[in-house]
């Protein structure tokens, strides 16, 4: 944790925002089917279900094809922000976001690139330990995207915070030259800044299907700017700064949980231990 701002109202009407949250309804009955993150009115990610007992989820969908970086902010974000309000970055990106209450968090992250099903994958590791495998498919949840793990820490004896950074498009879509440029800059001591819209989803299984019936606090950052920076940092083993705009209205967490987040994020990193 570098610094946190005060919760504030940001954004534009959803009809004008390039990014917004939506609910897909059943064709009959009108009940909620999927909770979605939309980009340019196309479903980009399926998110954790509203019930709070289903597993944490961010699943990339076929229509997730767009980044949301701003050319006007590139120079400002090449180096490290020292405060969330530096350089008008929040106001610039707020023009892409739906109206709502947001908590700005300025974080230092050391990203580790994760390939689903491989070493370090949350969905086939910690999530299976708590929820077991999907009862229909007989498999772990699958996010359909590489992602970055950046931090985790204990909330209490029965709950744990897991942090993820999710690119809007896969790292394989990144321009190799730009990634290499950032690797070189980081080698010279530069710490660039990325920007994300984030959610905090607190999920707890209703039944004991796994070996560890703990509560999972999933802090998920969806990258608006910084796709090349995150890959470069993971490649070089270097930190980047991440300006997170936590969408308080769209998180599956009560106000008290969100208020605890800055203090939890300032704790030492620690893995979940059981038994």
Image (tube, rainbow, N blue to C red):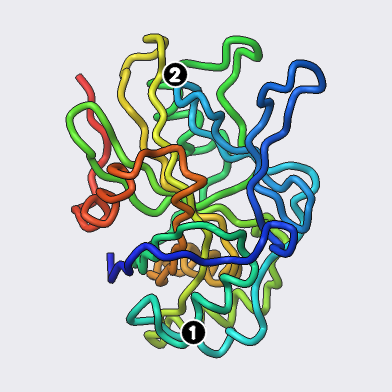
State how many labels appear: 2
Q: Quadrant of the N terminus?
A: bottom left
129 shown above or below 151: above
Tag 1 near tag 2, CB within 8 Å: no
Q: Residues within 10 Å of mark 2 (few under 14, many from 20)?
A: many
Q: Residue at x 23, y 44 (%)?
A: 270
Q: Is residue 121 left or right of residue 263?
A: right
Q: Secondary structure at mark 2?
A: helix
Q: What percent of the width, then of the height, locates residue 19?
A: 67, 58
Determine which of the numbered discs, if any, sits on residue 131 in the image: 2
Q: Quadrant of the C terminus?
A: top left
Determine which of the numbered discs, if any, sits on residue 117 in the image: none
Q: What percent of the width, then of the height, locates residue 70?
A: 65, 78
Q: Secondary structure at mark 1?
A: helix
157 shown above or below 258: above
Q: Residue at x 57, y 16 (%)?
A: 134
Residue, disc 1: 88
Q: Residues within 10 Å of mark 1 (few under 14, many from 20)?
A: few
- Is 120 or 92 nearer to us in this picture? 92
Quarter where residue 154 is shown:
top left
Q: Residue at x 26, y 44 (%)?
A: 153
Is residue 144 visible in this depiction of the protein?
no
Q: What percent of the width, then of the height, locates residue 251?
A: 47, 43
4 shown above or below 45: below
What is the CA distance from the residue labelled 1 to the residue labelled 2?
42 Å
Q: Is residue 212 left or right of residue 227?
A: left
183 shown above or below 156: below
- Is 10 or 169 nearer to us in this picture? 10
Q: Say whether disc 1 or disc 2 marks the residue closer to the N-terminus.
A: 1
């Amino acid at each position: 944790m570098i610094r946190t701002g005060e919760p504030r109202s940001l954004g534009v009407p959803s009809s004008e925002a390039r990014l917004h949250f939506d609910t897909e309804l059943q064709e009959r009955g009108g009940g909620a089917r999927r909770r979605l993150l939309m980009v340019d009115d196309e479903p980009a990610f399926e998110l954790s279900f509203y019930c709070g007992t289903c597993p944490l989820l961010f699943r990339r969908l076929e229509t997730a094809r767009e980044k949301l970086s701003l050319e006007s902010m590139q120079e400002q974000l090449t180096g490290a922000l020292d405060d969330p309000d530096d350089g008008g970055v929040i106001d610039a990106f707020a023009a892409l976001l739906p109206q709502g209450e947001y908590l700005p968090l300025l974080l230092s992250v050391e990203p580790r690139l994760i390939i689903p099903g491989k070493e370090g994958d949350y969905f086939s590791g910690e999530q299976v330990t708590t929820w077991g495998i999907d009862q229909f498919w007989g498999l772990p949840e699958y996010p359909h995207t590489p992602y970055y793990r950046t931090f985790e820490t204990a909330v209490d004896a029965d709950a744990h915070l897991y942090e993820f950074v999710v690119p809007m498009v896969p790292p394989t879509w990144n321009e190799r030259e730009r990634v290499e440029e950032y690797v070189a800059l980081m080698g010279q001591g530069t710490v660039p800044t990325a920007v994300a819209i984030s959610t905090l989803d607190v999920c707890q299984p209703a039944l004991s299907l796994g070996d560890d019936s703990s509560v999972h606090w999933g802090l998920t950052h969806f990258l608006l700017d910084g796709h090349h920076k995150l890959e470069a940092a993971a490649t070089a083993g270097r930190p980047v700064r991440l300006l997170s705009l936590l969408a308080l209205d769209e998180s599956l967490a009560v106000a008290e949980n969100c208020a605890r987040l800055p203090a939890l994020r300032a704790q030492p990193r620690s893995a979940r231990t059981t038994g």
